[in-house]
Amino acid sequence: MADQFETVRGIIGRYHHDRSRLIQAMYEIQDAMGYISDPILAMIAEGFGIAKSEVAGVATFYPHFQLKAKARFVIRCCSGVVCEICGNAALREAVRKTLRIKEGEATRDGMFLLKVGGCLGACDQAPALMINETLYGKVRPEDIPDLLQGVARGAAMGEKS
Ligand code: FES
């Protein structure tokens, strides 16, 4: 399974510990992940060689930064080259149609948020997408409604138990 933090590590690595570009890196990370969770704040601090409280201070100062998920499940559709060749555009369209949301939007019930980002590190399973930390590979557009229904149903069952 792909490590969701690989994306974050990759972004941090591109900034070469340059503290003057911290905010830019944080914007990029939020765009990729949907929000900046506590473990990600810690990764950013370590990557830039600064205190976590300093990164948290930046995140709370600027209203654009989200420290909590806007939705219970973040769907991350891959836009990497391999997935694009394998038809990820149709997958994204199926997600948009099924949930009636655009990229970057959350469903009204707060269940799903759609993000489109770079390679998920699972090119051998293209086209791929992730829902929170779970990777789904070789997904077909016609699988999307059942897949999303199953995730929502599983969440509802979890609440009842
Ligand atoms: S290009 Fe999609 S997982 Fe790598």
Image: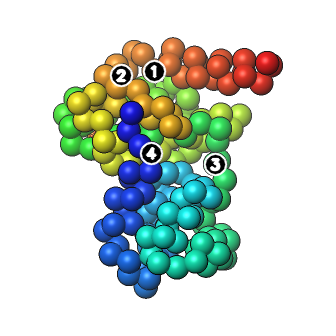
Q: Is residue 5 above or below residue 152?
A: below
Q: Earlier in the sequence, mark 3 or mark 1?
A: 3
Above or below residue 156? Residue 54 is below
The amino acid type of the residue labelled 3 equals Ala
Give the structural element (helix, strand or loop) at label 4: helix
CA distance for labels 3 and 4: 15 Å
Query: Which of pointers 3 and 4 indicates the residue nearer the eye?
Result: 4
Nearer the N terminus, badge 3 or badge 2? Answer: 3
Seen from the viewer's position, the closer of residues 1 and 125 is 1
| Residue at the extreme right of the image, as rendered | 160
Q: Which mark is residue 144?
A: 1
Where residue 93 appears, x then y in whole percent?
A: 40, 31
What distance separates the C-alpha of mark 1 from that of mark 2? 8 Å
Give the number of the mark in front: 1 or 2.
2
Give the labeled residue for mark 4: 4
SS at circle 2: loop
Name the kind of residue labelled 4 in the image.
Gln
The x, y position of residue 76, in whole percent, is 45, 40
Q: Camera-side residue: 88 or 17?
A: 17
Q: CA distance from mark 4 to mark 2?
A: 18 Å
Looking at the image, residue 94 sits to the left or right of residue 63; the answer is left
Seen at 34% across and 59% down, the residue is: 10
Q: Earlier in the sequence, mark 1 or mark 2?
A: 2
Q: Circle 1 — which element?
A: helix
Quickly name the residue at label 2: 139
* x, y percent for residue 70: 65, 47
Looking at the image, which residue is at 77% across and 24% down? Answer: 159
Tags 4 and 2 touching, CB below 8 Å: no
In x, y percent, where is residue 154? 64, 19
